[in-house]
Amino acid sequence: MNEVRLQLEELLFSSVENVLAESVVTTDMAVRVEAVSTVRQAPCPGCGSWSERIHGSYLRFPHGLPTAGKSVIVALRVRRFVCAASFCPRKTFVEQVPELTRRFGRRTERLRSTLVSVGLALAGRAGARMTDSLGRQSAATPCCG
């Protein structure tokens, strides 16, 4: 079973460092990947100082690039860090996983860049039809989950 998890981790997170896929659940319509960040510290976006002090954690659910005709939802556990700098107005901040998430993002970076490429190449309704055939909603249409 660990071999299958490692293969899926390589498939889904090949360009992402410091992410561990804990489990993968497949249904008829979707693939849900439970993942955690493995970094020990993160930089504060306000002042740039590094912090190791964890305030808490929560789950984010970015949609990923579809695979095998199924939508992919990543249940990513991210941590909220306490900023170590006393002069920083930001008391806590959430870690971002480069190449996977961005602030307030609802899509993985791979899905976002794919939708941007389709939108720039085809634009308008042709782009919407193409993303529908890929199994995802267009970037202009809100995700329903």
Image (tube, rainbow, N blue to C red):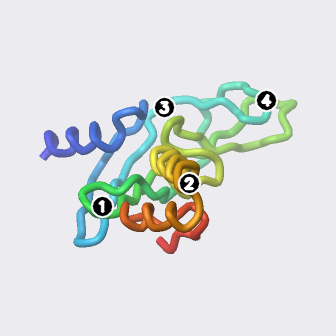
Closer to viewer: mark 1 or mark 2: 2
Q: Earlier in the sequence, mark 3 or mark 1?
A: 1
The relative height of residue 7 versus residue 74 in the rendered view (above or below) is above
44 sits to left or right of 128: right
Q: Earlier in the sequence, mark 3 or mark 4?
A: 3
- Nearer the observer, 66 or 1: 66
**CB-based contact (under 8 Å), mark 4 and mark 2:** no
How many tags in the picture?
A: 4
- From mark 3 to mark 2, how far is it between C-alphas? 34 Å
Residue denoted by label 2: 119
Q: At x 40% / y 32%, what residue is drawn?
A: 15
**CB-based contact (under 8 Å), mark 3 and mark 4:** no
Q: Amino acid at mark 2?
A: Gly
Residue denoted by label 1: 31
Q: Assess disc 3: are there few (<14), some (14-19) or many (≥20) residues with their C-alpha within 10 Å of its C-alpha.
A: few
Q: Quadrant of residue 102?
A: top right
Q: At x 55% / y 58%, what residue is drawn?
A: 106
Closer to viewer: mark 3 or mark 1: 1
The picture places residue 71, in percent across and down from the top left corner, at 35, 63
Residue denoted by label 4: 47
Q: At x 33% / y 44%, what residue is drawn?
A: 12
- From mark 1 to mark 2, how far is it between C-alphas? 25 Å
Q: Assess disc 4: are there few (<14), some (14-19) or many (≥20) residues with their C-alpha within 10 Å of its C-alpha.
A: some
- Residue most extreme to the top: 49
The answer to whether any part of residue 85 appears in the image is yes
Residue denoted by label 3: 39
Q: Assess disc 1: are there few (<14), some (14-19) or many (≥20) residues with their C-alpha within 10 Å of its C-alpha.
A: many
- From mark 4 to mark 2, how far is it between C-alphas? 35 Å
